[in-house]
Amino acid sequence: MKIDLAGKTALVTGGSRGIGRAIAIRLGECGARVAINYVRHTEAAEETAAEIRRAGGEALTLRANVGKLEQIDSMFAALQEAWGPRLDVLVSNAASGVIKPAMELNWHHWDWTMGINAATLLPLAQHARPMMSAGGSIVAVSSLGALRAIPMYAAVGASKAALESLVRHLAIELAPEGIRINAVSAGLVDTDALKHFRHRDSLLNGSRTKTPAGRLTEPRDVADVVLFLVSPLAKMVIGQTVIVDGGYSVLA
């Protein structure tokens, strides 16, 4: 199935690696010009942009820490300077957080994790809104930790639950303006972020065994669902969290 995003402009935060990279490339493959936000991994961001260009698309890299309001301001200013005042797709994917048992978390751990994973969506949406006067689509990337208790995932899980709640509240405000917002919740994906888990191998093996589809979720799987959500095929999908996990969460 071909989804045509020619003439559309997309911004993907955290777009240099992992799920964000897969999303950026998928949107680019379908004709969108894609702005790739990153904060540290310049080479990876440029490689992602190069892959989009090899596929015939247009790409731009924007360095900004979206956990800081002033850098969000400068990122959108740079985007508008490069490509003008229109934005059709925003994917809020950048994430971080502290992986510790809840009883070992301090206020800084909590504040940082909630800020970068949940609160950031609000200023991103506020900046995107005037650029989506002709309508648009926003997708936030969540995880199963929003619904399930995972060892050492208390701060991140709580932040993802807050993210999904914010998606629902923003959806009812923005839908009358033709702006759709949804979330995609990924199952366990073997990305660099998983290296911070002490029990990474057991998580991977356990998830692989328990997933009815018989394999782990891959970044491309998540990117395909994001592509659907930003396409006209999902024009009546608003305020939802779509789980992409091969059936893992269906099991107790």
Image (spheres, rainbow, N blue to C red):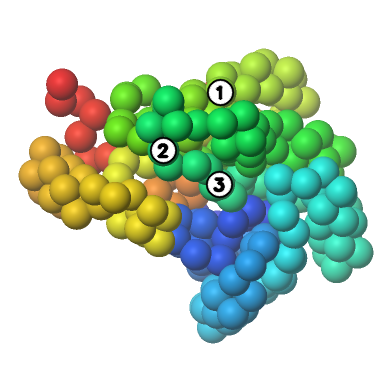
User: Is 55 located above or below residue 209 in the figure?
Assistant: below
Q: At 20% across and 25% down in the image, what residue appears?
A: 250
Percent from the top left, x then y, of residue 1? Answer: 38, 55
Q: Earlier in the sequence, mark 2 or mark 1?
A: 2
Q: Quadrant of the C terminus?
A: top left
Q: Earlier in the sequence, mark 3 or mark 1?
A: 3
Q: At 56% across and 66% down in the image, what residue appears?
A: 16
Q: Secondary structure at mark 3?
A: loop
- The CA span between labels 3 and 2 is 16 Å
Residue 228 can be seen in this image: no
In the rendered image, which residue does mark 3 sit on?
95
Percent from the top left, x then y, of residue 123? Answer: 78, 36
Q: Give the residue type at disc 3.
A: Ala
In the image, which is nearer the foreground, mark 2 or mark 1? 2
Residue 124 can be seen in this image: yes
Q: Give the residue type at disc 2.
A: Lys
In the rendered image, which residue does mark 2 sit on?
100
In the rendered image, which residue does mark 1 sit on?
162
Q: At 62% across and 29% down in the image, what residue appears?
A: 107
Crowd band around label 3 with a 10 angstrom C-alpha radius: few (<14), some (14–19), many (20+): many
Q: Secondary structure at mark 2?
A: loop
Percent from the top left, x then y, of residue 79? Answer: 82, 60
Residue 232 falls in image quadrant: top right
Whether residue 142 sits left or right of residue 151 in the image: it is right
Whether residue 190 sits left or right of residue 176 in the image: it is left
Q: Give the residue type at disc 1.
A: Ala
Residue 120 falls in image quadrant: top right
Question: Which labelled disc corresponds to residue 151?
Answer: none
